[in-house]
Image (cartoon, rainbow, N blue to C red):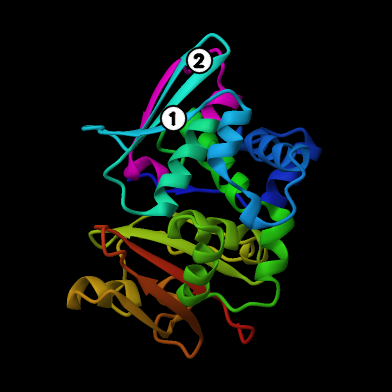
Amino acid sequence: MKLMLSLPFKTQIKMMRKGDSTPSYVGAISKARDLITKLQIREPSEIIVESIAAYLGAPIRFAYLDSCDGRMVRIGDSALITVSQSIDSVGQQRFVIAHELGHVLLHPHIRQLDEVDASQTRNFNHNQSPEELEANYFAAELLMPKCFMEPDVRGKEPSWDLIRELAKRYRTTLTSTAIQFVHYTKEPVFFVTTVNGDRKWFTPSDAARDFWLTETTRVHFYTCAHELKKEGKRNSRGNVPAGAWLKGFDLNGKETITEDATTPSNGDFTMSLLWINEEI
């Protein structure tokens, strides 16, 4: 199984300066920031995606959709975005709209019709199409732009309690909120997603770039993620051996990292925040 990595923002910028291959979603992030600036949005409460969609000529409607959470249909310079009326999460509704707006702005010549579901909107991995990844990063930055998010996470310890608090403030999803937290925190932290006991993808903060996760993708039984799977819990937090997650550490050594793991009530996957303590 191939393990995929989402690069930290500072690493992306360094790649751009060196002339190396740059992830395509860097442009998507810039487009979202430009839109926030152009609309003179001054605080998170002013990020009203329905109004932004109307401004961009892509009105929103809620209707029954049997195979997806959202759909975008483009005709010429106009588009119509349909959101499933069965979505009961405001955060998911807003992210679906922002995701489809990403296609409207970023892919005018290659996406005349797009459908998206929850499995795609929570996937910031490179195993889906570049266009879907770009739309996800655009949506995350539009809903939680750097100008607001960076001050909100400054000096805060990584935890799902904090992520839930931020998700409530910005009215978005846990996964996208965790992604933005990791991008803008100064703490050395990894965001890791596991499914059925296997690590699927992860995102490191820029401060964690000197550390590597273990080569094996099977989640070790010393971890909080394993505890959730084994005991059917929703949340678990504590210090775990650094070697259970990080390459180059003795599994039975004294070094530890803090892991905070959670399983969403509507998901079959586990998300872990790994905070690398100063001691190591």
Vertical comparison of 263 with 9: above or below: below
- Residue 180 point in image, percent of width and height: 58, 57
Is disc 1 surrounded by few (<14), some (14 to 19) or many (20+) residues within 10 Å?
few
User: Outermost residue toward the right?
Assistant: 17
Towards the viewer: 271 or 144 = 144
Q: Which mark is residue 110?
A: 2
Q: Residue at x 30, y 41 (%)?
A: 85
What is the tally of numbered marks visible in this picture?
A: 2
Vertical comparison of 265 with 106: above or below: below
SS at circle 1: loop
Q: Amino acid at mark 1?
A: Ser
Which one is earlier in the sequence, the residue at label 2 or at label 1?
A: 2
- Residue 36 point in image, percent of width and height: 71, 43
In the figure, residue 71 lies in which quadrant?
top left
- Residue 166 point in image, percent of width and height: 55, 66
Vertical comparison of 196 with 226: above or below: above
For the C terminus, the quadrant is bottom right
User: Outermost residue toward the left?
Assistant: 231
Residue under pointer 1:
129
SS at circle 2: loop
Q: Is residue 11 left or right of residue 259?
A: right
Is disc 2 surrounded by few (<14), some (14 to 19) or many (20+) residues within 10 Å?
few
Q: Which residues are magenta?
A: 102-124
Towards the viewer: 1 or 121 = 121
In the figure, residue 253 lies in which quadrant?
bottom left
Q: Amino acid at mark 2?
A: Ile
